Structure formats: C-alpha cells, structure tokens
Image (cartoon, rainbow, N blue to C red):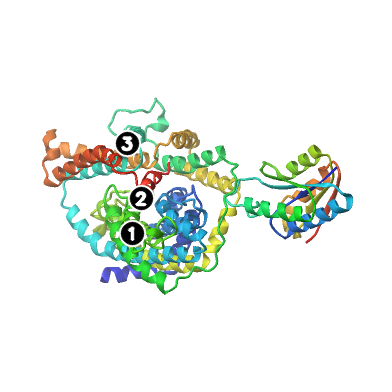
Amino acid sequence: MTIVVAYSPDEYGRAALRAGADEARVRDEDLVLLNATRGDALVDPRFASDEHIVEVQDALQEQGLTAHVRHEVVPDIAAALVDVAREVGASRVVVGVRHRSPVGKALLGSVAQRVILDAPCAVLAVKP
Amino acid sequence: MEMLLEGFGTALTPTNLLYAVLGVLLGTAVGVLPGIGPAMTVALLLPVTYNVSPSSALILFAGIYYGGMYGGSTTSILLNTPGESSSVITALEGNKMAKAGRAAQALATAAIGSFVAGTIGTVLLVVLAPRVADVVVTLGAPSYFALMALALFAVTAVLGASKLRGFISLFLGLAIALVGTTTGQPRLTFGRPELADGIDVVVVAVAIFAIGEALWVAAHLRRRPLEVIPVGQPWMNREDWSRSWKPWLRGTAYGFPFGALPAGGAETPTLLSYITEKKLSKRPEEFGKGAIEGVAGPEAANNASAAGTLMSLLAIGLPTTATATIILLAMQSYGIQPGPQLFDAEPELVWGLLASLFVANTLLLVVNLPLAPVWARLLQIPRPYLYAGILFFASLGAYSVNFDAFDLGLLLVFGLLGLTMRRFGLPVLPLIIGVILGPRLETTLAEALAISQGDLSTLVGEPVAVVVYIVMALLLVGSIVGPRLRRTAPAHEDEEEKVDVR
C-alpha cells in the first residue's frame, strides 16, 4: 500500500508532506508525491522547480522513507490526484487545506474538497 | 516652447492625467505579459475613440505604447521570455544578471535607462518633429508615394528573418486593402453588399492581433511553467551607475533615428546597441554572463525608438511599428489625418500629446521602479481568464464598428488567418501596415497621375522621390548581399540569429 501526498512548495504542501511522512512511518508504507500544475499560466509558484524536488526527495530518503515524485502538467489537479491514488492503490491521500473566505468559497473551486469527495480511499486533510 | 507649455496645460488636466495613468498601467501590464503587446491592447481599445475626446484617447494610447516598452524588460530579465520583441536583446544579459542574483540592478538600469532615453527621445521629438513637418509639407504626391512605398518595402524586407514571408504578409494586407468600391467598380467584394465599403481596418487589426493570438495560445495552452527569479526592490550602486550612463546615451542615439526611419522599429537599434556595448566594454568577458551594459544600452534604445516612431507618425504620417499603425488608425477614426499638416491643423492635440509623453515617462519610472515585483506577479494569471477577456473585447470592438454581425464573421475569418500566419511564421506587421497604407498609396498615386495627366515619369519627377527610390534599391541590394557576407564572416555573433522570434 502507498500514501499519496499532494505536494506544493508552500506551507500547505509542506504540512501535507509532514503528515504524509508521519503516516508512512507509522504504517510502514511508501510515499508518492504529486506536484502538478495546469500549465495554463506562465508562472505557477505552486509548481516546484526540479532542484526543489530533488531536495525534497533527498530529505525523505534521509528519514528512511521511499518516495516517488510525480511532477506533471495535467488538465485537472484534483482528477490527477484521484487517478494517481487509484493507480497505486493508495491507502491514504494527504492534502493541505487552506482557509477560504465565504466569497472565495463561492467563486473558487477547491482541489481538496474534490479529492475528499472523489478519492477511492481515506483522505487526510491537514492544516499548516 | 510656448506651444509645449500649452501642451502641458492640456496634458495635466485631471481627465487627461487620469488617462495617462491608466495608459502607463495598462501598457506596463501588457508589456509584462508575453504575447499580449501594446499593439493588441490599443487595437482592443479602439472603440473608446467613440466616446473619448481625441487628445485623451491619444494620451491613453501613447501611455500604453511607452508602458509596453518598460514592461517587456521585466519579463525578459526575470523569466528569460521577452514580453515584447523590443526586449529580446535585454533577455541576453538581463536574465544572466538575474540568475547571478543581480535582478534588482538589471531592473533598475532598465527602468532608469528607459526613463532617460524616453525623456531625451521626447525632447528630440518635440524639437525635430515640427521642423520635419515643415519639410515634408513641401513634398508633392510623387515624393509622398515614394516614401510610403519605402515604408512598406523596408518593413517587409529589412525586418524579420524571411523576405518571402514578409512579402506574402504584405501582399495579403494590400489585397485586404483592395476590397471595396472606392474606384467605382467593385473589387474583391464577392457580390456582398457588406463588403462594398471595404473591410474596416479595425476588424482586421483586432482579428490579427487579438483573435489570432488567442487561438494560438489556445492551441498551445498547457506548458510547463517557467521559473521566475524572485526579486526585491530594484536599486543600483555607484559602480552600476557609472557603468550604465554611457550605454543609456549611446542606446538613445541608436534608438531615436532608427525609430524615426520608415524601416525603424526597436529590434534593429537594440541589437546594434548590444553589439556596440559589447565592443566598447572594458569588461567584454562579462558579456554572456550578465553585463549591466548589455541591459542598459538596449533598454534605452527601445524607448528612444518609441519616441522616434512617434516622430515619423506625427510629422510624416507614416507608421513604422504595429502600435504606431494602430494609433494612426485611431487618429483616422477621429477624422484627423496625421502628417505634416497636423501641427498646424491640430496644435492643441499634438502638443498635448507631446507633453503627455513627458508625463507618461515620469509616471512609468514611478510605477516601475518600486513595483517591479508586483508586475511580475501578473505572470501567474491563468491564460484562459486572460484570453477570455481579450476575446470578449475583440468581439465587442469588431461589432461596434458598424453594429453588424457580418463583421463578427470577418473577425473570425481574419482571426483564423492570424493563427495561420503565426503557425507558418509570417510576420503580422507588414500585413497591418499594408492594410493601412494600401488605400493611401493608391490615392496618392491617383493624385500624382491626375496632376501629370497620366504621365508615369512624374513619379521620378521630384528629387526626394528619386533619393527614396535609390535608398530602396540600396536596401534591396543590401538585404540580398548582407546575409551572404555575414555567412562568410566567422560565426561569432550567434546571438544575431536568435533575435528573430517568430
């Protein structure tokens, strides 16, 4: 079994990674990190640089965890996360959730919400 | 001088000041965003000319033009993706500086250099334009015909990588300009009454720039995001200043005359300025690794060329860049004919515009120096939102020309043409200039031949016309022989080849 972490190089992604790593250690399972972008903006700060991905991988290795990183351009991030979870037969999906104002909730979709609803397994939603 | 002071009176009224601020903000924003340039923005904003006074609209457009030159450098430096073709050269050294942790200095020398060059360029414009207009006003129809032919030829043959592609684009434009019944008999109207009055240039411009670009982006939507280099407040130390001021002045000296020439544009002078700085630099080894001179010179050159472009637009009535072409279109929609008579016919408008250029330039320095990091955040806007807005304004603009759905069909057809041209690397500038200058070329020719009662030798009957034709012949020879010479020369200037983005 595997634990899938939705990663981004910000506090939410880091919180998700911390929780995912704890979970992986407790359950003695592998980690799969997904860092995806829709690629429709010229610059996406939540899409990590290659160097950053290597750093994260090295850090996890030092903690004795096996981690695969998916670093992809996808049309829909929530769907991609659910697909990865199905593909690797995940036991847990870990996502970071952010605060949204009422207006924000009305206007913007939420990746976390869609993952919670659509994922084939338990979802751990963490706050930074 | 007195006229200029009166111009400041026009430019500093609250309304016009507001339009200037709006213009520089919009201009910087579209300059920062690759693919969206000042030409497209001004084309999309052409409908404002229905409600806004001529001087306010021109102040807005001039602000956008100047702003685009500033904004392009930010993207070049931080992202290595030029926001505008005029900033291609800036990316060479600017991005290297940013990677070496000197992004703040690169942005500062670009902004201050742009300000210095823009101000000097505008002073030159104010001093020279009325004098040039006095000379041009004495020219007869044959000389004017020759000048227009030179502009068309030069833009097509001198700029851009491929002359064949340039001429395909130019003749497409001239063909579009033929549509209508201006000569009495219908030409290319396909029996449609809607085409009898010709195709409105606004529709063509909006379609080629906005729809073509939107379709192109839609076809290449998902891309791996680029990495933007984080930057703080732009600043320079004493050494940066002492290394920058000479390149600024030399860049200005290149930019203004090239902008004013019919074959101007900002691409040639920025390249020349870069090569000169590389030759003159005391530290040539730094070039290619982030030399501040390589940012200061080209950035000054592109702003000075914007001022030069306005000179040939205002004093001769010849547009030499895409943005100038659209500004010419805006003036025509007010019934104002740019050219030598403009300074006598519309003094308030012209001097108000010239004064507003000083205002815009100062505003740009204020807006750009402290806010560069904020502008860089514009790059995070998802393109679907951006282009949805552009398509909306494009359709609105095309429809508002005649309030006829037929124009929307034309918009789509020319939009597809724009996409095809991008796909096959045809430059759009010759097409747009062809559409605008085509009818004027025809009228001038008819006028010249009417005066001479059909005698063709009148076309070479004026000294200026003869000189212009000789220049054209030299350009033709130069553009055929030049590349061959360059090919035999040692291939050390490989930057030169990379310069032609699409």
- Front residue of B307/B104: it is B104
For the view shown, which residue lies furthest in the bottom direction?
Answer: B238
Give the quarter of the figure containing the N terminus of chain B: bottom left
Residue B20, given in percent of the width and then of the height, sits at 43, 63
Relative to B303, B381 lies left or right: right
Question: Residue at point 38% right, 46% down?
Answer: B494
Residue topped by disc 1: B277
Number of on-image labels: 3
Q: CA distance from mark 1 to mark 3?
A: 29 Å
Amino acid identity at mark 2: Glu
Give the mark nearest the N terminus, 3 or 2.
3
Q: Is residue B384 left or right of residue B150?
A: right
Q: Give the distance between the C-alpha atoms of the residues marked 3 and 2, in whole angstroms.
A: 16 Å
Upstream in the sequence, badge 1 or badge 3? 3
Q: Position of residue B102 (x, y in %)?
A: 49, 64
Front residue of this view, candidates B453 and B242: B242
- The image shows residue A78 at horizontal and vertical percentages of 74, 45
Mark 2 → mark 1, Cα distance in angstroms: 16 Å
Q: Chain ID for label 3?
A: B
Q: Earlier in the sequence, mark 2 or mark 1?
A: 2
**What secondary structure is marked by label 2?**
helix
What is the three-letter code of the residue carrying label 3?
Lys
Chain under callout 1? B
| Image quadrant containing the C terminus of chain B | top left
- Same chain? Circles 3 and 2: yes
Question: Residue B435's mark?
Answer: none
Residue B189 drawn at (x, y percent): 38, 28
Asked if labels 2 and 1 share a chain, the reply is: yes
Q: Which residue is mark 2?
A: B267
Asked if the residue at tag 3 contacts the one at tag 1, i.e. Cβ–Cβ closer than 8 Å, the answer is no
Q: Which chain does the numbered disc 2 sit on?
A: B
